[in-house]
Amino acid sequence: MSRRPATVAASLLAVLALGAVSACSSNSGSTTASSGSGGTPTVKLMVGGIDKQIYLPYQLAQNLGFYKKYGVDVQLSTEQDGGVGAEEAMASGQVDMAGAWYNHTIEFEAKGKAVEDVVQLSGAPGEREMCTKKSGVTSGADFKGKTLGVTDLGSGTDTLTQFLAAKKGVKTSQFHRIGVGAGSTAIAALQNGKVDCVMTTQPTVAAIQKKGVGASAIDLATTQGATAAMGGAYPAASVLARTDWVNAHKDTVQKVVDALVATMHWINSHSAADIANKLPASFVSNQLVTKADYITALTEDKGQFLPDGIMPAGGPKTSLATEQLVGNVKGSVDLSKTFTNDFALQANKSEGFKTTTTPAGPTG
C-alpha cells in the first residue's frame, strides 16, 4: 500500500490534461535508464501523489529546469487512487525510481528485497491530525474510543495513526480506523460526523481549517512537530530505487540527485509564494483551495523540507521504531542497506552548497 495521502482526482485530471506530468509506461517489464536525444539518460519516476505539498520537489525540479541542467530526462508520473503504489511500481520494474516515503525501504529490507533511498527530501511526514472541536483529541492518548480517518487501511497515515496511539499506550483495538481518502472525501467525513479526526496533508488541511470543520490537534507537518510527537525526525518524502538498478546506473542516479539537491536549496532560499509561482496552476488553485490558501499553508509547513537532501541522523532509527511498534516489521533490519547519503553529499560538494543536516551513519 502507498504511504501517502490520496490525490485530488479533479486536480490530477487537470494536471494530466495539461501534460504537467507524463503518463507512466504501460510496459510492466524491467526498465533501464535509456539514452534519449544527445545521449541524455531517461529515468521514469513515479510519485505517490504529485500534486500534494509533501511531494512538490519532484515537479518543482522539472519546472525549474534542473533535471535538464544536470543532464537527465526525468519522466514524471503519479500513482492514482486504487492503482499500483509508486514504491510497488519501482520494485516491480515498471518505473526506475519512486517518489515515496523512506519507510518502504525498511519494509522491503525486512522482506529480503534490496531497495534504497538515494536522496532525502523531508524530515517530517507533512501530515496533521485534523479533529473536530467536540472530539477532545490533543494527543494519541485521546484516541481511545474514537473513530479516526486515514487515507486507506495499510497506508502511511494508518501506520502513523497507530504509532501515535501506541506511544501513549493506547491499543489498536481501543479505537476504530477507516479509510476516507483525502481532499473532499476526507473533509466530508469530518463534516458529516463519520470520523472524529482525520490524518491528512496540505492542501486538504487548509480546506478543513477554512471550512471550520476541524483544527490541527497533532503536528507531524514540520520536522520540529514530528520530533516532538514521535521522538525524532521522521524522514518521509525521498527517492527510492532498487539497489541493483542504482549500482548499474550510478552516473544517472547522481544526475537525478544533483537536480533534487539543487531544488532543496532553492526551496530553502525562496518564499512559499515563489515556490507556488513555479508549480502548475492546478496544484495551487483548485476546488479545495485558492492560491492564497496554498501559499499560507506552505508557509506554515515549509519546515518539513530538508535543505540539502541528506538523510538526518536518527531519522532511520525513528522510522524503524515506528514500523516495529505497529507490527509492520518484526526482527532485525540492517539500516545501512536502506539508504545512502553518498549521492547527496557529492551533489552538495560539487555545487559548493553549504550543508546543515547532520548525516545519519550506517546504523541510522
Image: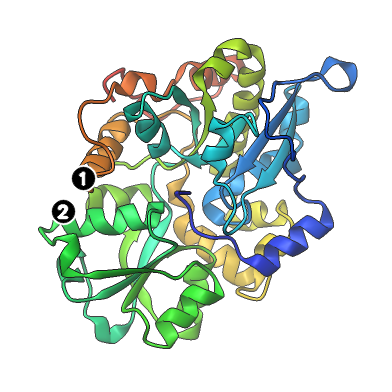
In terms of depth relative to the viewer, which is nearer, 265 or 247?
247
Does the rendering let one see residue 185? Answer: yes
Q: Are marks 2 and 1 in contact (CB under 8 Å)?
A: yes
Residue on which disc 2 sits = 167
| Coordinates of residue 187 in the picture (x, y in percent) | 48, 78
Q: Quadrant of residue 73?
A: top right
Whether residue 264 sits left or right of residue 328 in the image: it is: right
For image coordinates 15% across by 53% down, the residue present is: 167
In terms of depth relative to the viewer, which is nearer, 190 or 309?
190
Q: Which circle's residue, 2 or 1, is located before the other in the chain?
A: 2
| Coordinates of residue 14 in the picture (x, y in percent) | 76, 64
Residue on which disc 1 sits = 231
Whether residue 82 sits left or right of residue 3 in the image: it is: right
| Coordinates of residue 96 in the picture (x, y in percent) | 63, 28
Question: As shown in the figure, which amino acid type bears the numbered disc 2?
Answer: Lys
For image coordinates 20% across by 29% down, the residue present is: 331
In this view, 44 is above or below 278: above
Whether residue 311 sits left or right of residue 56 in the image: it is: left
Question: As shown in the figure, which amino acid type bears the numbered disc 1?
Answer: Gly
Q: Nearer the viewer, mark 2 or mark 1?
A: 2
**Secondary structure under badge 1?**
loop
Does the rendering let one see residue 213? Answer: no
| Coordinates of residue 301 in the picture (x, y in percent) | 46, 57
